């Protein structure tokens, strides 16, 4: 809430002024969102790899979210996946990763489960569950298994640039 009202209200703002400033803050948020949508549709961020998965995310995601995905794609360079166990169509991989913590590099091993029949993946780092994008560990396993498409369940509507956000249609006093 502080970020939303930053620069619009303060501790001594009365109710009438708050209502007016709320409309101003809402208008500014909608203008920023519309500008970001326009930018996502008319500016294409170049891909940094030959991965077909990156191209899919480039076409579907907003520019801001695509930049986050690109960081994970670039981060794939520093991971080392190895097959740990295979039970039928479920393969368990250990993915060694190097994470920068302050002034040193910490080695971390993540576990990725891959269902070959359904192209279903799950990583122990839980980046998808926390931030809504596939992590470098999952992307590396998809690359090892030559996966060329992304299941719809891994492309959240909230990050798509082709979805019209209905909250921008809320009427307020400035309309």
Image: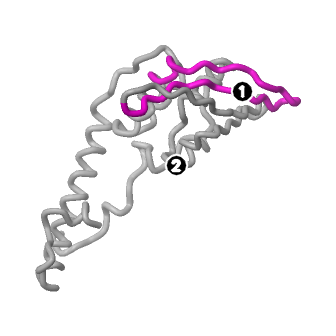
Crowding at mark 1 (Cα within 10 Å: few <14, some 14-19, many 20+): many
Q: Is residue 58 visible?
A: no
The residue located at (65%, 24%) in the rendering is 141
User: Badge 2 is on which residue?
Assistant: 130
- Quarter of the N terminus within the rendering: bottom left
Query: Picture coordinates of residue 71 (x, y %)?
Result: 42, 28
The majority secondary structure of the magenta stretch comes to: strand
User: Badge 1 is on which residue?
Assistant: 93
Badge 1 marks a residue whose secondary structure is strand
Badge 2 marks a residue whose secondary structure is helix
Query: Picture coordinates of residue 162 (x, y %)?
Result: 42, 43
Is 159 on the left-hand or right-hand side of 88?
Answer: left
Query: Picture coordinates of residue 127 (x, y %)?
Result: 54, 42
Crowding at mark 2 (Cα within 10 Å: few <14, some 14-19, many 20+): few
| Quarter-of-image position of residue 102 | top left
Is 4 on the left-hand or right-hand side of 12?
Answer: right
* First in residue order: circle 1 vs circle 2: 1
**Residue located farthest toward the bottom when viewing the structure as drawn:** 15
Compare residues 154 and 133 and report the one nearer the observer.
133
| Quarter-of-image position of residue 46 | top left
Is 103 on the left-hand or right-hand side of 32?
Answer: right
Q: Is residue 136 visible?
A: yes
* Residue 20 drawn in magenta: no
Compare residues 60 and 16 and report the one nearer the observer.
16
The residue located at (44%, 22%) in the rendering is 74
Q: Which residues fall within the magenta stretch? A: 74-102
């Amino acid at each position: 809430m502080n970020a939303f009202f930053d620069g619009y209200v303060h501790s001594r703002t009365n109710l009438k002024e708050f209502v007016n400033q709320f409309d101003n803050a809402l208008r500014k948020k909608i203008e920023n969102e519309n500008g970001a949508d326009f930018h996502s549709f008319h500016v294409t961020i170049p891909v940094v790899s030959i991965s077909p998965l990156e191209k899919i995310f480039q076409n579907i995601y907003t520019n801001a979210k695509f930049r986050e995905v690109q960081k994970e794609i670039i981060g794939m360079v520093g991971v080392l996946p190895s097959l740990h166990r295979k039970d039928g169509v479920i393969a368990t991989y250990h993915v060694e990763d190097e994470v920068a913590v302050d002034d040193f590099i910490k080695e971390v091993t993540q576990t990725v489960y891959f269902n070959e029949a359904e192209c279903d993946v799950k990583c122990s780092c839980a980046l998808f569950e926390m931030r809504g994008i596939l992590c470098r560990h999952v992307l590396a396993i998809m690359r090892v298994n030559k996966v060329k498409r992304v299941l719809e369940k891994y492309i959240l509507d909230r990050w798509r640039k082709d979805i019209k956000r209905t909250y921008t249609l809320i009427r307020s006093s400035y309309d």
